[in-house]
Amino acid sequence: MVAMGAGNLSGRRQVALSVVVPCYNEIDSIDELYKRVSDACQKQVGSAYEIVLVNDGSTDATRNAIVEMAANDPHVVGVDLARNYGHQIALSAGLEFCVGNRILILDADLQDPPELLAALMAKMDEGFDVVYGQRQGREGESWFKLATASLFYRLLRKMVEIDIAADAGDFRLMNRRALDHLNAMPERYRFIRGMVSWIGLRQTAFSYQRQRRFAGATHYPLRKMVMLAVDAMTSFSVAPLRFASHLGMAFGVLGLMALGYTIFSWAAGSVLPGWTSLAAIILILGSVQLLVLGIFGEYLGRMYMEAKRRPLYIVNEIISGEMPKGQNLDIRDLQSRLKEAMRA
Ligand code: UDP
Ligand code: MG
C-alpha cells in the first residue's frame, strides 16, 4: 500500500492524524485553510494525515471548492451534509467520520492557527489524551462578544459539577481513545467542548492567541450564542430546575407572610382599599409562575426531541478523489467498504 491519504479508502485506517473542519459558507477562507493545514500536517506526520472538511449546507461555492480539493489531493475528504445543521452537529459528523489516531479540531476561518499543531502534538506526547486550546486573548472580536462569552463561561462553571475550562473553544487535539468516548454519546443537544471535559481522562490546557477571522463574518450572532449557552446549561446541569424550586419555596414563604398580613388587616377591619397591592401580587406571582414553567419547558422540550431518536444528521455524499469523476459514493456503501477493508 503506498498512499495513506483519505482518498485511498482501504488505507484510511492508517492515518496518524485527522484534521476535522466544519465549513459553512467559508469560500473566502478555505483555500488558505487547506494550504496552511496541509503544511502543518506534512511537517508533523509526513503523508499519514487526512483533512475532513464537513460542508454544513453552505450556500456559497464552499462545496465546489471541497470537490476540487478532494479531486487533486487524496488527503482531502469531504462530508457533504444534506442541509445546514449547525456548527456542533457538523463537527460531530466530521468526528464520527474521521479515522486518525489523533484528531485536531479546527475552525475554517483560521481563528485557531493550524501552525500550533506542532506544539499540541508535543504536549500530547507527554501522555495527555486531550490538549485543548485556551484563548489568552482574542483579536478582532467585539467587546460585547468578549464580555458575554466570559460571563457565560463563568456562570456555566458555577452551575456544573464537571470542570469545563473557561475561554476554551472547540480547538483541540484528541487521541482516538478520547474521541471514541465522545462519539459514543448519542445526545442531540451537543455542547462538544463540555462533553469532552465530561469524559475526563488526562486533559490539559494550551494557551494561545485567538486570531482575527481570515475572511467573512461570524456565523454566531447573538441569537445562536444564546441558544448554545442554553444548550450547554441544560445539557450539563439541572441547576435551573433547582433554581425554579427554590424560587417556589421563597415565594411560598412570602405568600404565607402576606396571608398573615391579610388576616390581620381583616381582623383590624381595614379591608377595602388595596387594589395596587393586589395587582402587584398577581403580577409578580404570575410572572414567577411563567418563569418556572418556562424552565420546565426547556427541559421538557429537550426530552421530547431526544426521545424521537432521529439521526443527528444526514450525509448527502462523501466527496473523495478516489471516486470516479461525476460519481460520488453513498455513505452506506462507503461504510460497508470500510468494514470490509477492516476485516481484511
Ligand atoms: N459553522 C458551521 N455551521 C454553522 C455555523 C458555523 O459549520 O451553521 C462553522 C464555521 O464555518 C466555522 C466554525 O463553525 O468553521 C465556527 O463558526 P464561526 O467562525 O462563525 O464562529 P465564531 O468563531 O465567530 O464563534
Ligand atoms: Mg470563527
Image (tube, rainbow, N blue to C red):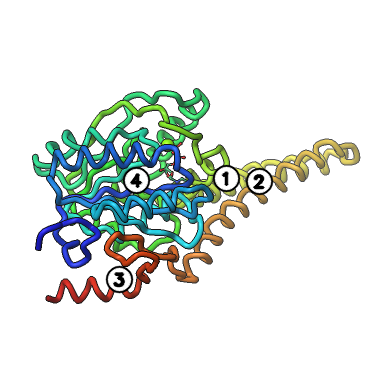
Q: Which mark is residue 288?
A: 2
The mark nearer the N terminus, 3 or 1, is 1
Residue that label 3 marks: 334
Expressed as whole percent of the image width and height from the top left, the position of residue 82 reads: 48, 62
Please give the name of the residue rendered at 35% of the width and 56% of the height, measured from the top-left corner: 78
Badge nearest the viewer, 3 or 2: 3
* Callouts 1 and 4 close, C-beta under 8 Å: no
Expressed as whole percent of the image width and height from the top left, the position of residue 49 reads: 19, 50
Disc 4 to disc 3, C-alpha distance: 29 Å
Disc 4 to disc 2, C-alpha distance: 33 Å
Callout 2, which amino acid? Answer: Val
Residue that label 1 marks: 247
Badge nearest the viewer, 4 or 3: 3
Disc 1 to disc 4, C-alpha distance: 30 Å
Residue that label 4 marks: 193
Q: What is the crowding at mark 3: few (fewer than 14 residues within 10 Å), some, or many (at least 20)? A: some
Please give the name of the residue rendered at 27% of the width and 36% of the height, measured from the top-left corner: 36
Which element carries disc 3, helix, strand or loop? helix
